[in-house]
Image (cartoon, helix red, strand yellow):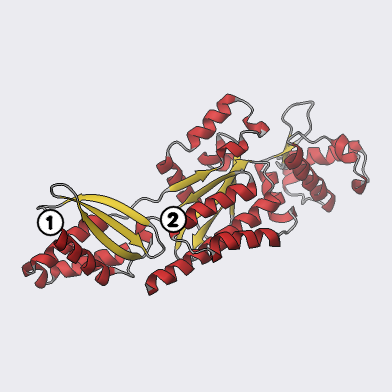
């Protein structure tokens, strides 16, 4: 960008041309020429005048020319300026709102069913790839703990959160525990720890270990030992991905190498969760485009994502992943509304879980 253009604000006409280039490229997927824009009466400019404006926008870093003889396409900065300042404000249509509400708010569901439903809705309504990161167990409130006897000294622990998420873990005990003892321990832990998250439970366990009663009460000692094994880790969030086939028809994935890159993006779920966790700091919808993240750079894709849960304590994130020329005017409010709807649905489920 030249120094002159850095210090020279864009004119209303510059903004109109940039907005038209972005919207045309999103629709066609082809570089936009000055000649094609000059044919639109609303600009009242010659092709030469529009070409000069587009050259200035290129100097500013908002447009780029893929080939010498081709038209221009938006850069990451151009997309962001369009999203932040030029994109017409649009909410989710009433019909889509009702459809989302019917699937998330009115149907009785537990947390895992809600995660699956919102993943399907994201793909169905966006025609892009949906990504949903489920809550880690340590971020959820416990509803119940159940221990099931396996062979030898192995015990299956089933943890159910208040919002319906289930986590299973096999643990080794010092001695085989009879079924009756496991049932008693399960009931004791559920009665004493339901309604707390794992961090609060660990603090309470430390207090109990310091009490003299735990040193003389064999059943309580066994309960504390099992609880430490079962509840001693945060648990890893899972990532749900759906709709990869929907973007394979896009021209951005016309060669097999890019298809391989797309599939490779989702092969390491743990890495995907980490990257999403790093990106999703704060509240509101975030738009990450191309080289702004390792997640989007290889394919020159975009991620439109938001967190769900409460602003003070987000539980996870959800978003739409697809080619950078996605229809942001429709996608951004869709992601925002689905994040709010999922938060409300989980809060409803959480309230029911606390009351049970």
Please say whether residue 232 is visible from this viewpoint: no
Closer to the camera in the image, 18 or 213: 213
Residue furthest toward the left? 216
Q: Which residue is drawn at 86% across and 40% down?
A: 37
Please say whether residue 194 is visible from this viewpoint: yes
Residue 166: assigned label:
none
Closer to the camera in the image, 138 or 341: 341
Q: Residues within 10 Å of mark 1 (few under 14, many from 20)?
A: some
Q: Tag 1, which secondary structure? A: loop
Asked if disc 1 and disc 2 are in contact, CB closer than 8 Å, the reply is no
Q: Height in image: 71 above or below 223?
A: above
**Which of the 4 quarters of the picture holds residue 38?**
top right
**Which of the 4 quarters of the picture holds residue 270?**
top left
Q: Is residue 224 left or right of residue 324?
A: left
Q: Which residue is drawn at 49% across and 52% down?
A: 116
Estimate the x, y position of residue 327 in percent, counting from the top left.
Answer: 69, 47
Closer to the camera in the image, 122 or 45: 122
Q: Name the residue under label 1.
A: 177
Q: Tag 2, which secondary structure? A: helix
Q: Can you say which quadrant of the picture contains the N terminus?
A: top right
Q: How far is mark 1 from mark 2, CA to CA?
A: 31 Å
Estimate the x, y position of residue 268 in percent, counting from the top left.
Answer: 42, 38
Residue furthest toward the front? 180
Q: Height in image: 174 above or below 33?
A: below
Q: Residue at x 37, y 72 (%)?
A: 356
Estimate the x, y position of residue 353 in percent, counting from the top left.
Answer: 39, 69
Q: Is residue 70 left or right of residue 184?
A: right
Q: Name the residue under label 2.
A: 112
Q: How crowded is mark 2: few (under 14 residues within 10 Å), some or many (20 or more)?
A: some
**Which of the 4 quarters of the picture holds residue 18?**
top right
Residue furthest toward the bottom? 355
């Amino acid at each position: 960008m030249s120094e002159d253009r850095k210090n020279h604000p864009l004119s209303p006409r510059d903004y109109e041309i940039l907005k038209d280039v972005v919207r045309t490229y999103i629709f066609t997927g082809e570089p936009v020429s000055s000649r094609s824009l000059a044919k639109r009466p609303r600009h009242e400019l010659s092709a030469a005048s529009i070409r000069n404006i587009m050259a200035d926008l290129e100097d500013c870093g908002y447009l780029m020319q893929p080939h010498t003889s081709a038209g221009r396409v938006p850069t990451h900065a151009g997309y962001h300026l369009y999203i932040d300042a030029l994109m017409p404000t649009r909410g989710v249509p009433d019909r889509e709102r009702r459809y989302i509400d019917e699937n998330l708010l009115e149907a009785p569901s537990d947390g895992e069913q809600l995660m699956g439903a919102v993943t399907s809705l994201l793909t169905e309504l966006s025609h892009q790839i949906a990504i949903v990161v489920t809550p880690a167990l340590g971020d959820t409130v416990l509803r119940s703990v159940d221990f099931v006897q396996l062979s030898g000294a192995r015990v299956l622990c089933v943890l159910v959160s208040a919002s319906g998420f289930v986590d299973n873990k096999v643990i080794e005990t010092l001695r085989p525990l009879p079924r009756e003892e496991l049932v008693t321990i399960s009931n004791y832990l559920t009665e004493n720890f339901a309604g707390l998250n794992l961090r609060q439970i660990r603090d309470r366990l430390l207090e109990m270990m310091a009490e003299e009663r735990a040193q003389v009460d064999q059943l309580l000692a066994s309960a504390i030992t099992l609880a430490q094994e079962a509840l001693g880790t945060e648990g890893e969030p899972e990532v749900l991905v759906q709709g990869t086939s929907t973007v394979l028809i896009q021209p951005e994935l016309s060669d097999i190498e890019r298809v391989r890159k797309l599939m490779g993006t989702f092969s390491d779920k743990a890495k995907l969760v980490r990257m999403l966790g790093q990106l999703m700091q704060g509240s509101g919808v975030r738009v990450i485009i191309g080289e702004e993240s390792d997640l989007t750079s290889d394919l020159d894709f975009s991620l439109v994502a938001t967190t769900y849960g409460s602003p003070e304590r987000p539980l996870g994130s959800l978003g739409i992943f697809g080619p950078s020329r996605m229809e942001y005017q429709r996608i951004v409010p869709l992601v925002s509304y689905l994040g709010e709807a999922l938060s409300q649905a989980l809060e409803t489920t959480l309230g029911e879980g606390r009351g049970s």
